[in-house]
Image (cartoon, grey):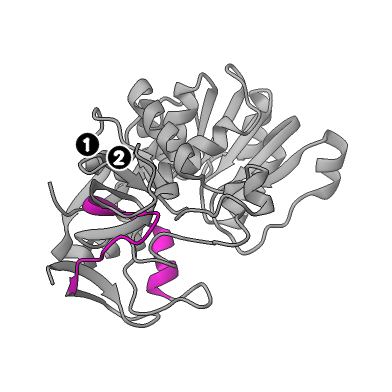
Amino acid sequence: MPKMRAVQVVRARGPFEIVEREIPEPESGMVRIKVQACGVCHSDQVTKDGLFPGIQYPGVPGHEVIGLIDAVGANVPPRWTVGERVGVGWNGGYCGYCDSCRRGNFFACETSTQVTGVTRDGGYAEYMVAPFSALATVPQELSSEDAAPLMCAGVTTFNCLRNSGARPGDLVAVVGLGGLGHLGVQFAAKSGFNTVAIGRGNDKEALARKLGASNYIDTAAQDPAAELQKLGGAKVILATVTSADAMKAVIGGLAPTGTLMIVGAVPSLEVPALQLLLKSQQVKGWYSGTSLDSQETLAFSVLSGARPMNEIFPLDRVNEAYERMENGKARFRVVLSIAK
């Protein structure tokens, strides 16, 4: 049988191993993808460290995948053909017939909870398989390395903002200028929002304005809630950080009926209930998105010029790439370039 290189984890909190595996065959309803690029994301820790129950090892992480369809299984709709470039994100497909799917809430599928790189081997490999419901078409204007982070970090921020209730001209603040935040600022500005970037340190202001922010708030020197209120209050605050304290510090900057949208994973968050009640405000979490959301994120990125800032590594330097992501030194996304 033909072989491929893959990066696997054999146990929770175990090391990465670069191994040879048999190239998988696509089952009914699935395609095989020759992987060109795969982003390295904080959520890859789910498989690396065994953060979800029931993970089967050995497993291959990676859920920011771009590649070419190289084989098509039975019962795949004819729109998906060999040679087509596609992307696969965190949402690894859905059944289409449970009550949640029938309501259009595909992300909450009740019968087929599939997560790329968690419940099924992901993109840290030369080949992978995926159900057709997980596929997004990739525009030719995007390189595979630029498209890969948009399959998670991109769709998470873009899809959240476009469903936040904000309209062009509204004041929208983005908390954090990291892997998620640097894309959030671009998407907010290019959507016509009056965009405020919130970070720690005045050294980030130049970058924030280059990305499209009209204003920058330095939390090391300013009270972000007070500064937002001076600007009239935020219709939406997009929290991309993984610090509950940083989120708590900005809630007071919401305008009446404003919303704090959370995409940064924190275990818990204390909120000022009386403020929310008196001002009809809300705190809301947002799931990343499904394959069509990813496809529309890619299309908007082409239309608007929004792009991730990436550090690119070959597959055999996966340990270095993952370390750059994990310790926060990467500026701002890390991508494995696997095949052309």
* Image mark for residue 147: 2
Q: Nearer the viewer, residue 124 or 120?
A: 120
Residue 305 against residue 125 in the figure, above or below:
above
Left or right of 272 in this view: 231: left
Which residue is pictured at 21% across the width and 68% down the height?
Answer: 6
Left or right of 116 in this view: 142: left
Q: Nearer the viewer, residue 81 or 209?
A: 81
x and y percent of residue 93 in the render? 47, 53
Element type where label 2 sits in the image: helix
* Callout 2–callout 1 Cβ contact below 8 Å: yes
Q: Is 28 covered by the magenta stretch?
A: yes
Q: Is residue 198 visible?
A: no
Q: Is 178 covered by the magenta stretch?
A: no
Residue 282 against residue 142 in the figure, above or below:
below
Left or right of 216 in this view: 59: left
Displayed quadrant of residue 144 = top left
Which residue is pictured at 29% across the width and 30% down the height?
Answer: 139
* Image mark for residue 143: 1
- Looking at the picture, which amino acid does disc 1 mark? Ser
Magenta residues (range): 21-49
- Looking at the picture, which amino acid does disc 2 mark? Ala
x and y percent of residue 14 in the render? 33, 81
